[in-house]
Amino acid sequence: MYLDMELLRFTTAGSVDDGKSTLIGRLLYDSKSIFEDQLEAVKNVSNQKGDHYLDLALFTDGLRSERQQGITIDVAYRYFYTPKRKFIIADTPGHIQYTRNMVTGASTANAAVILVDARNGITEQTLRHYYIAYLLGIKSIIVCINKMDLVNYSSEPYFLIQEEIIRISQKLPVANLIFIPISALKGDNVVKPSANTPWYSGQTLMQTLEAIPIYNHSHRGPLRVPVQYVIRPMLDEFHDYRGYAGRIESGTIRKGDKVMIMPSYMLSEVTSVHLGENFLEEAYAPLSVALTLKDDLDLDRGCFICQPEQLPQTSSILEVMICWFNMIPMKLNQLYTIRQSTWEAKCKIIAQHYKINFHTLSEENSQEELKMNEIGRFTLKTSRPMVFDKYSQIRSTGSFILIDDNTNETIGAGMIQ
Amino acid sequence: MGEYKALFTIKMNHLRELEAEAIYIIREVAAQFERPVILFSGGKDSIVVVHLAYKAFWPAPLPFPLLHIDTGHNFHETIEYRDALVKKTGVRLIVGSVQETIDNGKVKEETGYNASRNVLQTVTLLETIEEYKIDAAIGGGRRDEEKARAKERVFSHRDEFGQWDPKNQRPELWNIFNGKKHLGEHFRVFPISNWTELDVWQYIYYERIEMPSLYFTHKRKVFCRDGVWLAYAPFMKLKPDERVEEREVRCRTIGDITCTGLSLSKASSLEDIISEIASSRVTERGSRWDDKRSDAAMEDRKREGYF
């Protein structure tokens, strides 16, 4: 009954017309994840538009304006499963003005599928996508060289693109870099191996997705439980109960473990770990649990439960990479709200170091303000000391968002270096 | 709290990961909002959400009430299940009545063969949200249900008119959910966004959640309209060629009786249902009349403030 599947989240990215929506449509269609009524609906729309073939992109373009313009505007999430894994796809648009969505999709992904048009080779968008996947700590990047049917399945463009990306990866390394020649439209090497690419002996995209390591070793890391909410039942039966509810973002915890509360450095001992009514022998990342402690401590949302031997850092001055999402550029020394995990404070960006130039993937020494869809390195100062880890070590305690206090919008995202 | 009773070992799999994510989201609502509710329809998705919320706050009772928008066209089994659940958990129940909205002259009842109160309930929902000053409504919506839902955020912002602006949604990164808002605005929150229909049933099986009898095969008076089996109720208008007959059916989704298509099915257990869905060739909304009205029917209703 498929009760024990692994979960792989991946993001797809490509420039306009690279055929990303078509590729996802193809994955769903060939893996028999498209249902008859969806197929019927897409056939109807395809016929109305006068297309000669089934427009697979219609399976994913959800909003009316997207279908009219034939483009993807917003991140769309898609789901399918094979007997081995359940997959969550974050399908992100390739338009330059919507790059923030690529960052959004990548933030929860285990793998990134980057599409390159075999005819055009690497573009600025390809570099941008590669860089974002790298910056967000995605361990597996699968480069699909698409539209092989339009270059007569010649190996030349494939190897050129591969060579160039390998060169980039020497500076920006990822654990697992894979190249696959495909045609999303015709189905070559997507789910079924292609007879048109005899010079390619690797796996299809689907085989790759089923086999790549998920790299989720967070349960082996140092203990981090950000307190989300304090459970106080006010019932006779549980008169003195105080449960600290939170998600274990890293590490493993058992009854009897000694813990240190940050930022107060108070010590205590775990008296129980439970998930609903079930008391657990041990719990580990990424479970959401409730803990009770031996001592009555002043402990609230925004505190972190840690191991005394492996404490996070504490500082109000941070070195960060920031991606900007808002039409109004970032301003140095302006007050923003910063939210990291369940913790919140005010902050100012006090110094700018460099911006990323996506044409060359180089660090550009620029004092020009950070605009929408740009990424740069900054020094940030928080109104209260922040308890954190480097993003490369623990994602959840090393990442944050910036919120505009006037509009309440999420205007930027950052990673602690 | 006494001694450790039964020690429980957890094996990690996709269901546990989805559960952990959903519980995290529900707790974020409790922490970030003042007057949240759980939208309860009596369908499987909202039943799972209530179950997750129960787990999220145990041993404390649910810190927010259930809100049921009652179209007046319910399956009686739904109301019985709802009332039993309220009794068992002691949770507070708020009911918004579509009949009252109609009686107050705020909306006009649809007429004709396909008359449904499905669209009308948006008005009742928004009125109830305003009346109780609800700032977050937790729903059982899933992104795999329908293509407009696939683009919705977990914390989905609604302006002071209750409307959704799909082109101007807040980016949602990692597990950081921004629920900040101005007075009069509210959020819809979808803790099981990333679940599929199959995940929901597997989880129900895993957790042994009691389900309404409607989901299992039973004999019912039905009629067939344009290939969809609908339950017969006295207020439904039959076309001349439609005949009421008795069939063995079950619900795959539960909504208003006028728009809930039934499947001919002999599935009598959770195991039967799971294998039926795993091999199914049509989506669960394939038989929902409310979605068939136009290709963008769901998007249009959502923009207006629908669930």
Image: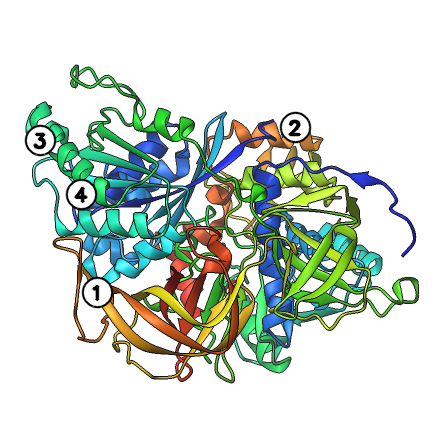
Q: How many residues crowd mark 1 within 10 Å: few (<14), some (14–19), many (20+)?
A: many
Residue, disc 3: A157
Residue A241, x across and y down, in percent: 84, 64
Instruction: Tell me where residue A67 appears, x and y as whole percent.
Output: 25, 52
Q: Chain of mark 3?
A: A
Q: CA distance from mark 3 to mark 2?
A: 51 Å
In which quarter of the view is residue A244 placed? bottom right
User: The residue under label 2 is which amino acid type?
Assistant: Asp
- Distance of mark 1 from mark 4, alpha carbons? 27 Å
Q: In this rendering, would A367 be left or right of B93?
A: left
Q: N-terminal of the two: label 3 or label 4?
A: 4
Q: Which mark is residue A355?
A: 1
Pick out the residue farthest to the front. Answer: A309
Camera-side residue of B141 and A114: A114
Q: CA distance from mark 1 to mark 3?
A: 31 Å
According to the picture, the residue beneath numbered tag 4 turns out to be A18
Q: Quadrant of the N terminus of chain A?
A: top right
Could you confirm whether marks 1 and 4 are on the same chain? yes
- The residue indicated by pointer 2 is B272
Q: Are marks 3 and 2 on the same chain?
A: no
Q: Earlier in the sequence, mark 1 or mark 3?
A: 3
